[in-house]
Image (cartoon, helix red, strand yellow):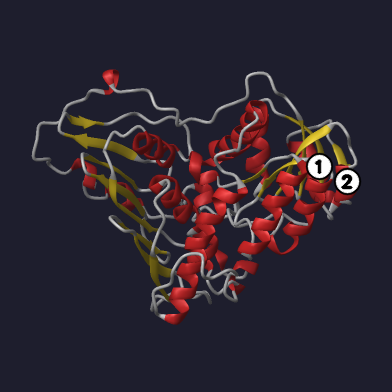
């Protein structure tokens, strides 16, 4: 019952540490001017003070303060608990089959939390309303099902499930039990992703016609870990954040086809291909996602959303150093973003679930909503294996990894 390490905090080359590897050469600091610093065809104006305020930061419920239980105390849960403690959420129980792991988290974050090695004992606590399940997907389904049947609201780690029909069944079970089931897609509350999403929802760039993202970093940290055994590591475990971002930006518009590929670089020393890309077709829009996962020197991250009345672009040497601009006929606005993906993204996922419980509504990152992101992800993995375009939703299970 160790935690899902897909956002491993132990390696500084992984997005858990925002691609800011401390081992990168000093040359990183001497990168050429960014895309956002290039000359523009119009005079740049700063209208930040008159720009509409967008709700991109994590939110907390007004008065609802439930007791929370955590199942799985592996590496990534340090970010969960750090965020919860900062938000003053009350975590009263920690569970892991490795008692020492649970005790370590108690010592670090919640000194009064009860410790369990059997998740059913935690679920028997009537005082616990919300359960955060952080384990690997192979064992997660049974834990989620037990929690839902125990009448608990559940936040599930990502990627949510390995089978879309299983995910649908869990969503139906949550409805039957009268509880909420959400997915910890913490990237939704990465400041630049969250701001772009809210700007699109506010209609600031009109109808979206293009979404183009590129991530260039070194994912070689997986060498010698369990993740080196995941064949589709980049398009599945890593890219799910970007497929999810794409889903939130495109809203109700459904993708028609996905074409993807994956290949190793000529110099990588780990087993799974570290280079991946996906092109997503919509009726009147398009998207591209590029993942260069073997860039030993330097790193770069960029996001571009184009609309019929403006564009939004963000870029930086890592995911914590993003400069964002919105360009319309009125000029260019460059809002100063607050927060960082880690740990604020984890505050965002739990906070949204708690707000939804308080407001008696579906959370924006509900299980059903997340299945749309997984449809894109599964289609991309299948396409990379078949070398043919795939219709999202037709691949019901993650191809063998």
Q: Is residue 46 above or below residue 124?
A: above
Task: Pick whichever, 43 or 32, lies toward us.
Answer: 43
Q: Is residue 285 above or below residue 89?
A: below
> Which residue is found at the position 72% from the left and 55% from the top?
135
For label 2, the SS is strand
> Which residue is found at the position 44% from the left and 51% from the top?
247
Q: Position of residue 386 (x, y in %)?
A: 45, 81
Q: Position of residue 36 (x, y in %)?
A: 23, 42
Between disc 2 and disc 1, whose residue precedes? 1
Residue located beneath label 1 in the image: 94
- Characterize the local packing of mark 1: few (<14), some (14-19) or many (20 or more) Cα atoms within 10 angstroms: many
* Image quarter of the C terminus: bottom right
Q: Is residue 234 visible?
A: no
Residue located beneath label 2 in the image: 116
For label 1, the SS is strand
Q: Position of residue 233 (x, y in %)?
A: 53, 67
The answer to the question of whether label 2 and label 1 lie on touching residues, with beta carbons closer than 8 A, is yes
Task: Pick whichever, 180 or 293, lies toward us.
Answer: 180
Measure how far apart labels 2 and 1 are at the Cα level: 6 Å
Q: Is residue 232 above or below residue 192?
A: below
Q: Position of residue 82 (x, y in %)?
A: 65, 36
> Which residue is found at the position 52% from the left and 74% from the top?
272
> Which residue is found at the position 56% from the left and 51% from the top?
370
């Amino acid at each position: 019952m160790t935690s899902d390490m897909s956002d491993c905090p132990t390696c500084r080359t992984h997005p858990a540490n925002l691609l800011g590897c401390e081992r990168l050469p000093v040359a990183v600091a001497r990168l050429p001017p960014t895309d956002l610093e290039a000359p523009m065809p119009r005079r740049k104006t700063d209208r930040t003070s008159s720009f509409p305020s967008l709700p991109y930061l994590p939110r907390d419920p007004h008065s609802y303060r439930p007791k929370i239980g955590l199942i799985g105390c592996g590496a990534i849960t340090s970010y969960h608990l750090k965020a919860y403690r900062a938000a003053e959420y009350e975590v009263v129980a920690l569970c892991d089959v490795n008692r020492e792991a649970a005790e370590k988290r108690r010592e670090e974050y919640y000194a009064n939390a009860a410790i369990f090695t059997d998740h059913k004992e935690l679920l028997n606590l009537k005082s616990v309303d919300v359960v955060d399940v952080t384990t690997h997907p192979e064992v997660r389904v049974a834990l989620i099902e037990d929690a839902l049947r125990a009448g608990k609201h559940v936040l599930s780690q990502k990627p949510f499930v390995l089978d879309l029909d299983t995910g649908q069944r869990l969503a139906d079970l949550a409805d039957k039990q009268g509880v909420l089931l959400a997915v910890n897609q913490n990237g939704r509350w990465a400041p630049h992703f969250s701001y772009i999403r809210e700007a699109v929802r506010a209609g600031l760039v009109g109808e979206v016609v293009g979404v183009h993202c590129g991530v260039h970093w070194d994912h070689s940290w997986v060498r010698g870990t369990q993740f080196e055994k995941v064949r589709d590591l980049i398009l599945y475990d890593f890219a799910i954040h970007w497929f999810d971002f794409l889903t939130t930006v495109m809203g109700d518009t459904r993708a028609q086809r996905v074409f993807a590929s994956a290949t190793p670089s000529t110099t990588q020393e780990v087993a799974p291909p570290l280079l991946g890309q996906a092109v997503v077709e919509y009726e009147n829009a398009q998207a591209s996602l590029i993942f260069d996962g073997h860039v030993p020197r330097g790193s770069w991250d960029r996001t571009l959303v184009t609309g019929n009345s403006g564009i939004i672009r963000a870029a930086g040497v890592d995911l914590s150093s993003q400069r964002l601009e919105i360009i319309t006929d009125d000029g260019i606005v460059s809002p100063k973003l607050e927060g960082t993906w880690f740990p604020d993204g984890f505050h965002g996922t739990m906070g949204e679930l708690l707000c939804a419980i308080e407001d008696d509504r579906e959370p924006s990152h509900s299980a059903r909503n997340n299945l749309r992101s997984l449809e894109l992800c599964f289609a991309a993995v299948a396409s990379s294996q078949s070398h043919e375009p795939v219709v999202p939703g037709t691949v019901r299970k993650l191809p063998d990894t």
